[in-house]
Image: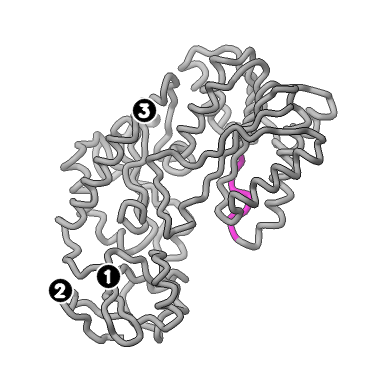
Amino acid sequence: MKNEAPGPSHHLQTVRLTAKGLRWRRTGHPWVYRNDLEGTPEIPAGDLVAVADPGGRFLGQAFYSASSRIALRMVTEGAEPVDRDFWEGRLKRALDYRRRVVAGTDACRLIYGEADGFPGLVVDSYGGHLALQTLHPGMERRLPEIIELLVAHLSPPSVTLRHDAEVRLQEGLPLVVETVLGELPPRVEVREGLVRLWVDIRGGQKTGLFLDQRENRLAAAALSRGEVLDAFAYQGAFALHLAPGAQRVTLVESSGAALAVAQDNASLNGFNHLDLVKANVFAFLKEAVAAARRFDFISLDPPAFAKSHRDRDAAYKGYKEINRRAFQLLNPGGVLVTCSCSYNLSEPEFLAIVREAAADAHRQARLVERRGAAKDHPALLSLPESLYLKCLILEVE
């Protein structure tokens, strides 16, 4: 396991792949699993290692994990030095890309892990305040350098570590939320199109806001009308975009704390035609059908029902039920925006579930648009896990 790789990476420990691992690596997937390594390397977590095929031929450089099922996260296929200049070059490319594709908002994702060449790192900006999340010891060990570069290029008023994702435990990393630079107010006001939102960077979902849905919210807003239902409303981001075109918007959310922020967001935007309902969405939809309520527009943005492969059966039932109820509640000509952020259900599978739900509700639906995550969340083709978000816009007859 300590064979030396040729070229500039000769000082790194070398990890060899099995023949099976080499076949997997040739797919381009940036992760290599532990059962695809020869033997069990005794290498500190987070070390940069040289990766070699079974015959010792150099394949690239990767971060090593000592505990996760994902043993290697590829950093480069070349042997160039992985130093400050290396990371600065990748950061410049990531920032330049956002300047080109992000408009009309001051809240966006600046670095999206492997898609931007930073394995296991997420950096989000909310009104200039930065929220960072590392999911791998390799990137965690380089955080001081990364933060230094971010400060040099962006001069943020604050930098906060959102190291509270439970997946960190699989890497032996602690859970902590900490502002490490500057002063972070309890809430930050951000702009998304014509909508203003309060963001709690320290305590909000993900790093404060569901940034990946931004462009889907904007697309939905253009179709809003009449009686609108926003189910799984969280802090009301979808509802606020839908409100200008609606007669009334009903927000349904099980978290009282999230609804309190939604009310503040409504006040921030001057909306007084929103009804906030604290309820289990499944129960609300069932009761609404029984009461023969009708809506002209429904948004379904639930949490991930299939967080692992073993959740697939339960997720299938959950997605089908909420979509069937939504079809039953829509007026003719109504619009359904339905989403899934479960990677373990593919887009074809999600389409099949929604199609079956429509059939069970005896409704015909036209697929107006298929959407994914916002452009600041670019998917890496070789990493199907980054193609997680599905958003369907349907018109119901």
The label number, if any, that marks residue 131 in the structure image: none
Q: How is the image coloured?
A: one colour
Q: CA distance from mark 2 to mark 3?
A: 42 Å
Q: Amino acid at mark 3?
A: Thr
Q: Residue 76's spot in the image, x, y percent?
A: 27, 65
Q: Residue at x 71, y 38 (%)?
A: 323
Q: Earlier in the sequence, mark 2 or mark 1?
A: 2
**Residue tagged 3:** 105
Relative vertical location of residue 240 with respect to residue 111 in this rendering, above or below = above
Q: Residue at x 56, y 46 (%)?
A: 341
Please say whether residue 253 is visible from this viewpoint. no
Secondary structure state at the residue bearing disc 3: loop
Secondary structure state at the residue bearing disc 1: strand
Relative vertical location of residue 273 with respect to residue 50 in this rendering, above or below = above
Which secondary structure class fits the magenta region best? loop
Please say whether residue 29 is visible from this viewpoint. yes
Q: What segment is highlighted magenta in the picture?
A: 302-308
Q: CA distance from mark 2 to mark 1?
A: 11 Å
Judge whether residue 305 is colored magenta.
Answer: yes
Looking at the image, the residue that sits furthest to the right is 290
Crowding at label 2, few (<14), some or many (≥20) Cα neighbours within 10 Å? few
Q: Amino acid at mark 2?
A: Pro
